[in-house]
């Protein structure tokens, strides 16, 4: 076999193998979950334009950073209430130019 053919065959086999790796990925927003709605009508352009609407893991919804609280001087105790947007359950993202929650 000529060397270019072997290289193309190897690249094809690698592409097929890697294509099957992503088949079992779960969606970010699974069906049946309680996904918090965005609170702001302000337009976002990137994920950094969005933030939780509370400090210290107490947020319940995503909002635009211009409407989010300033948490820089807030002291947190490290606890999280159930069904809050923070604490690993959801993150605030920019989706379709509005702040939304991406949840697990």
Image (cartoon, rainbow, N blue to C red):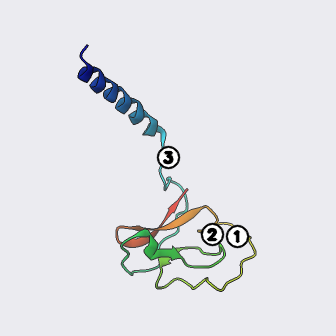
Which residue in the structure is indicated by mark 1?
81
Direction front: furthest residue: 3
Which residue in the structure is indicated by mark 2?
84
Which residue in the structure is indicated by mark 3?
26
Q: Nearer the viewer, residue 7 or 91?
A: 7
Q: Quadrant of the N terminus?
A: top left
Question: Horizontal and vertical percent for residue 8?
Answer: 27, 26
Q: Quadrant of residue 70?
A: bottom right
Q: Quadrant of the C terminus?
A: bottom right
Report the residue at 62% width, 69% height from top.
84
Report the residue at 45% width, 72% height from top.
48
With respect to residue 46, does 102 lie above or below? above
Q: Nearer the viewer, residue 72 or 83?
A: 72
With 83 as the anchor, is 31 left or right in this view? left
> Is there CB contact under 8 Å for labels 1 and 2?
yes
Question: Horizontal and vertical percent for residue 43?
Answer: 36, 78
Name the N-terminal-most of marks 2 and 3.
Answer: 3
- Quick one: label 2, few (<14), some, or many (20+) residues within 10 Å? some
């Amino acid at each position: 076999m000529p060397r270019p053919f072997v290289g193309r065959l190897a690249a094809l086999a690698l592409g097929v193998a890697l294509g099957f790796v992503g088949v079992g990925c779960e969606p970010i927003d699974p069906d049946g979950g309680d996904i918090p709605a965005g609170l702001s009508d302000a337009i976002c352009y990137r994920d950094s334009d969005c933030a939780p609407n509370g400090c210290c893991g107490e947020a319940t919804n995503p909002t635009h950073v211009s409407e989010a609280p300033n948490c820089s001087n807030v002291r947190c105790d490290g606890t999280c209430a159930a069904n809050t947007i923070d604490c690993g359950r959801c993150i605030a993202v920019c989706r379709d130019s509005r702040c939304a929650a991406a949840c697990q």
